[in-house]
Image (cartoon, rainbow, N blue to C red):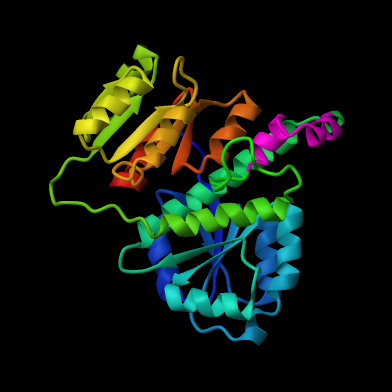
Amino acid sequence: MAEKKKLLLFGANQSLIKDFFSQLTYQFEMLSCSSCEEDIRGHLNYYDPDAMVLCVYDEKREELSMLGRIKDQLKQRGSALIVAGDGTKCDDFERMMPRMADCIVRRGRAVNCQMMGGQINSYLDSISMLRMIKKEEKPADTDEMAANPGSSSDAGSVNVFSPDPVGKTKGKDSLDDLLAAAAEAVEEMASMPVQRAPGDRRHVLVVDDDSSMLRMIKDILGDRYDVAAAISGKVALKFLESRRTDLILLDYEMPEQSGAEVYEKILQNPALRHIPVVFLTGVSDRERISAVLAMRPRGYLLKPIDSDRLKKTVEEIVG
């Protein structure tokens, strides 16, 4: 089972902080602290969170002035600054502190606390993958990749959930630009709520050329969801001509039609483009992972598939 990510919560929205503790302990390890700069720094030093979450309410600009100094410490530690709260409060924060937050997660009628947790988790997953790719890249490769637009550096610039098509992301993007793109995409996820009917079993379409993978995923999800299997992209697209699904789990590397090609066809079809897609991909190929992220799917799962992670990802998207 994947290790829980660590969040340090603070801010004036004590109601939201309580909701995080009461509803998201299954997903995160969490601590809270006061908004005192010395207290925050102390917690950062001994707790070492993956992200610091400011639960905003009615903070004044002078109360937020210390965030610039805290942000420097967060960057040094490789942690993110996430702002969470009601839409209007988040908008107020953006006006007062433009470009301060790495990611902003808004709560609203269609976005509850669990969905906010899913957005935060997706953002941190993306950043973790970015760090892994950067860490594994050899310094000697830097010049070569920068000069070759088709190299793994470019295929990712790992512009997580970026609107750029595969292979067109500019290699000159800075790390801050990449983080901003990931944050923007997470915010867009909040505007795509899944409509649920009471007692209705959600439908999941799994597309993979490996029949054993299809059987395994069907066994893991079958108790809770209606699962259909497609052995190729062609079969999947034919299925979608007459059947509906709530989620597509799509293998990235397939013969004849790759997952990327199938996803492009889905996006080109107005009747299908709303369906969330989660790519299945191998962890060892950095270029492949980067290309997956650059296509801006709803998420990705690394092979070999972790059953707990699979269940959690599907539940976050379709319930």
Vertical arrangement, residue 210 with respect to residue 251, above or below: above
Residue 179 appears left or right of 83: right
In the image, is residue 292 above or below residue 113?
Answer: above
User: Which residues are the magenta region?
Assistant: 141-158
Q: Residue at x 24, y 53 (%)?
A: 195
Locate residue 81, reporting x and y percent: 62, 62
Question: Where does residue 51 sit, x and y in percent of width and height?
Answer: 59, 57
Q: Residue at x 36, y 13 (%)?
A: 212
Tell me the chief SS of the magenta region.
helix
Instruction: Tell me what residue is drawn at x 24 percent, y 27 percent.
Output: 239
Residue 10: x and y, percent? 55, 70
Closer to us: 99 or 234:
234
Relative horizontal placement of residue 102, taking residue 145 as reference (left or right):
left
Q: Residue at x 40, y 34 (%)?
A: 265
Quarter residue 308 falls in: top left
Depth order, front residue of 19/127:
127
